[in-house]
Amino acid sequence: MLPHWRCLDIGTGIGTVATWLSRRCPDGRVVATDRDCALLPPAAERDWEALEHDVTTDDFPNRSFDLIHIRWVLSHLRDREAVLARIVRWLAPGGWILIQDLDRFPIASSPDPVYRKVSEAMCDAVEARIGTDTSWARTFPAPLRRAGLVDVDTEAHVAPTGATAMGRFWLGSTDQLRGDLLDQFAVTEPELKHVREQMVNPSYRDFALASVAAWGRRPSPRHA
Ligand SMILES: C[S@@+](CC[C@H](N)C(=O)[O-])C[C@H]1O[C@@H](n2cnc3c(N)ncnc32)[C@H](O)[C@@H]1O
């Protein structure tokens, strides 16, 4: 990264990554967008620009950013690859994009059959409710190649569940999805209880979602 880069963080949430970017690009510009800016810190407490902007419908001028980051957003959008193609147009020639999304692939190999069943059902329930594709990120970096980018690559990080931060997220998700799991996805009360107990059990460890990252750059004349 260079200090003068123009950076865009899409679907910034509370703006953690925008703050990180602005420290690394003090002579550049950092714009952070979200379709709902309610969680952003007030203007006096940030050194980056915030913009209410829906990535599926709102635009930016072509070639206006040197770096674009979008984490945990695209897999939730039904038209994700068309949205990605639009975002790529906002990159300057030679500019980089980093995308990150969550994928269910670690669940299939769980040694705990009840945890495996309930966790698979949780992913199915999110897909049915929101339209999320919980297996899209496992295809990285192919979507970036399809979008015309070069120098693409990928890596994944898998945080454990149990009495951990990811376990707390998984436990909260069982609360949010409880009705769907019991009524539509053939999960029983004892199975749900088993998973909920393991998510506060300090000696239990398993995996749920992997965070998969992929990056690539827009071709510049040196790639021609
Ligand atoms: C799971 S949060 C991720 C937040 C942040 N990217 C991070 O890594 O911490 C997803 C964010 O994307 C935003 N979002 C969802 N759909 C969006 C859209 N169509 N355009 C812009 N932001 C969107 C949500 O409002 C939410 O803040």
Image (spheres, helix red, strand yellow):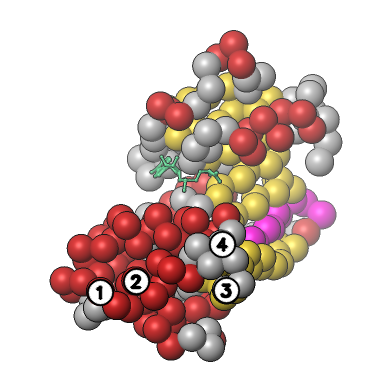
- What residue type is disc 1 on? Glu
In the rendered view, would you say 89 is above or below 126?
A: above
- What residue type is disc 3 on? Tyr
In the rendered view, would you say 185 is above or below 160?
A: below
2 or 4: tag closer to the N-terminus:
4
3 or 1: tag closer to the N-terminus:
1
Tag shown at residue 193: 2
Label 3 residue near ligand 1, CB within 8 Å: no
| Labels 3 & 4 near each other (Cβ < 8 A) | yes
Residue receiving disc 1: 189
Viewport quadrant of the C terminus: bottom right
At x 49%, y 56%, the residue is: 168
Viewport quadrant of the N terminus: top right
Give left or right: position of 141 versus 14.
right
Q: Residue furthest left?
A: 183
| Labels 1 & 2 near each other (Cβ < 8 A) | yes
Secondary structure of the residue carrying tag 3 is loop
Give left or right: position of 59 versus 25.
left
In the rendered view, would you say 96 is above or below 13?
A: below
Q: CA distance from mark 2 to mark 4?
A: 15 Å
| Labels 4 & 1 near each other (Cβ < 8 A) | no
Q: Nearer the viewer, residue 89 or 191?
A: 191
- What residue type is disc 2 on? Lys
Residue range highlighted in magenta: 209-222
At x 33%, y 78%, the residue is: 191
Residue receiving disc 4: 163
Give the overall secondary structure of the magenta segment: strand
The reply to whether the magenta stretch includes residue 20 is no
